[in-house]
Image (cartoon, helix red, strand yellow):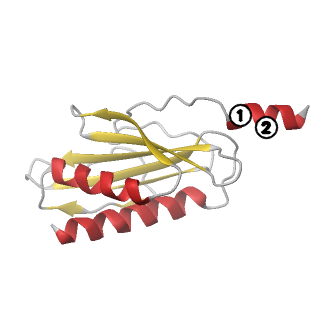
Amino acid sequence: MALGLLLSLVGCGVEAHVEDLRTVKRPDKPNNYLICPKVLCVGAVDEEGPMVDLTPEKVLVAALKVAAAEDNTSPAEVNAGVAQIVFIQRTPWLRFPDIVHIQAIQSASGRTGVALYSRSVYGYYDFGANKARARRWMAAIQAELRRN
């Protein structure tokens, strides 16, 4: 019975939708991690996100390059209106889906804030997986932006 449930979760489709990270409503579970410039995000963030002197488009191109280098990752949705790309990354063995949102937020000063929200679809604890993913992806995005 448990094996059947597990196998049904592995193959299930996941719907991942754009959520404006400036006002995202986070669950009361510890299996998510938000990096966002505090000046641009209304709610609590786990870590301060960077502000860059590049266009939102350049930030999202860098995010696409980073995601393409990640294993088991595919784009789920793109929304130009809020300058966000949503990805699904599956765990290596059991292929559980996690959702990663990357948003380029234009500030009033003309700078662009880079926000990243990583969350598990299933479970309560993630043993730090979303924090590690968010930090790894953000570091790679920043490295890619420095190359531009």
Is 72 in front, or is 106? 72
Residue at image location 22% in from the left, 54% down from the top: 59
Q: Residues within 10 Å of mark 1 (few under 14, many from 20)?
A: some
Residue in the foreground of this view, choosing between 35 and 132: 132
Left or right, 18 with respect to 134, comes to left
- Please report the residue visible at 64 percent of the width from the left and 30 percent of the height from the top: 12
Q: Are marks 1 and 2 in contact (CB under 8 Å)?
A: yes
Q: What is the quadrant of the N terminus in the image?
A: top right
Residue 41 falls left or right of residue 27: left
Query: Residue at label 2?
Result: 6
x and y percentages locating residue 84 in the rendered image:
30, 40
* Quadrant containing the C terminus in the rendered view: bottom left
Figure check: 46 above or below 43: below
Residue at 71% x, 34% y: name it. 9
Q: What amino acid is labelled 2 in the image?
A: Leu
The residues tagged by marks 1 and 2 sit, at their Cα atoms, a distance apart of 5 Å
> Left or right: where does residue 39 sit relative to residue 12?
left
Residue 147 visible? The answer is: yes
Residue 145 position in % (x across, y down) = 22, 65
- Taking the image as drawn, is residue 39 in sight? no
Give the residue at mark 1.
Answer: 9
**In terms of depth relative to the viewer, which is nearer, 37 or 136?**
136
The spot of residue 23 in percent (x, y) is 36, 38
Q: Position of residue 126 (x, y in %)?
A: 66, 54
Left or right: where 82 falls relative to 11: left
Secondary structure found at label 2: helix
Q: How many marks?
A: 2
Please state which amino acid type lies under the numbered disc 1.
Leu
Q: Which secondary structure lies at badge 1?
A: helix
Q: Nearer the viewer, residue 103 or 2?
A: 2
